[in-house]
Image (cartoon, rainbow, N blue to C red):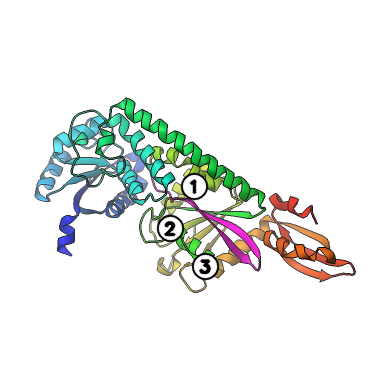
Amino acid sequence: MIENEEKQERILLAGVELQSNTDSFESSMAELSDLTKTAGGLVIDQFTQKREKPDGRTMIGSGKLEQMRWAIEVGAIDTVIFNERLTPRQNVNLEAALGVKVIDRMQLILDIFAMRARSHEGMLQVEQAQLSYLLPRLVGQGIMLSRQGGGIGSKGPGESKLEMDRRHIRTRIEDIDKQLKKVEQTRENIRKKRNQSGIFRIGLIGYTNAGKSSIMNALVGAQKTQYEQDELFATLDATTKMVKLHEDFTVSLTDTVGFIQNLPTELIKAFKSTLEESANVDLLIHVIDASNPHHEIHEQTVLKIMKELKLMGIPVLNVYNKMDIAPSDFLPTLSPAIQLSIKSLDGSQWLKTAILEKLHELFHHFELNLPYEKAYQLPELRKVALVQELEEGETGYLVKGLISPNLLWKLEQY
């Protein structure tokens, strides 16, 4: 165990508490520690400072900087990670003052995305985000451009690409743009086919590590394929599976990347097409980790990003997950909501029941006569509609049920 720890990069965390971030500062610093562990770093020390405004040269005050320099020497620190976004000049000044590699929260998140990317599209998106972020930081001096040793902050594009001049990097970004547009076109074609199929679409959305992948696997059942782990950003790629909710009634379920406080704008831009999968659904399931003491801040972060992605007009079912380890006095802050632990024996059934109840609110009632000679169409009807009653008449079946307003056209053939 000691041998493994010695191989880990030794990290010092730093943060500046301003009046504008007082409410979320504690949770943000705790999250920075979790992000560092996710990236494989070992947190040795942490320094924070309250200020009216950040220091323009070094983000943090000179006195605190001196304390950090001493802690770096004593703790054999390899890297300092700031919770705030650093300007290129601040980055250079800090590395010159501290004598070690300095990165910020944004670069750390980009680094984790580079570790997690599995698909060709995901890798392209991460590389584009990293190059866009690092382009203004190619100042040609300081430790920033001499990181041959690797470690946190060095994954993704690689040192050789970072040493290209700005023109070559812009050319690479343009090349990635073209490749992503082709992938986006393919995604759009798949999306159109899915829409034409008449399947009701549900999307999972939520803060990272809230349990979205676990929920997808629980609903899909025996064919579970989504990677799930108790870690930040366990999955990046949008995944869509078919789920039977009731008898033959089938919906599509899409899982996308989780959100986080101060998600880098470069990532939001690069993952735009992936995130837009959530905009093409009929119902959103907002998954919240009820066991996290900062769940209310997480909720507001997700709602803010939903607003940015123009998802606020889509019906939402809030699901408070991990109730088995939540505080006994837990109370939900969003509604409508259900509380469950998806890993419990009846967790998936509770969720299916809650989804069906939500669909009863959203769907339209219908009645139709299906001639006996067309009875072979009944199984197909059951796939897209909730059939509640089936009565035999003189010439055919009287079918009563519920169907999505967007799929009323599917009844025309009947």
Could you tell me the amino acid type at mark 3?
Gly
Element marked by disc 2: loop
Mark 1 nearby-residue class (10 Å; few <14, some 14–19, many ≥20): some
> Could you tell me if residue 192 is visible in this image?
yes
Left or right: residue 8 compared with residue 359: left
Q: Is residue 171 magenta?
A: no
Please report contact status of discs 1 and 3: CB closer than 8 Å, yes or no: no
Task: Residue under label 2, please give it.
Answer: 210
Task: Residue under label 3, please give it.
Answer: 221
Q: Main secondary structure of the magenta part?
A: strand
Could you tell me the amino acid type at mark 2?
Ala
Of marks 2 and 3, which one's residue comes earlier in the chain?
A: 2
Who's the residue at 62% across and 45% down the image?
192
Of marks 1 and 2, which one's residue comes earlier in the chain?
A: 2
Residue 377 x/y as whole percent: 76, 62
From the viewer's side, name the closer residue of 17 and 219: 219
Who's the residue at 83% across and 67% down the image?
397
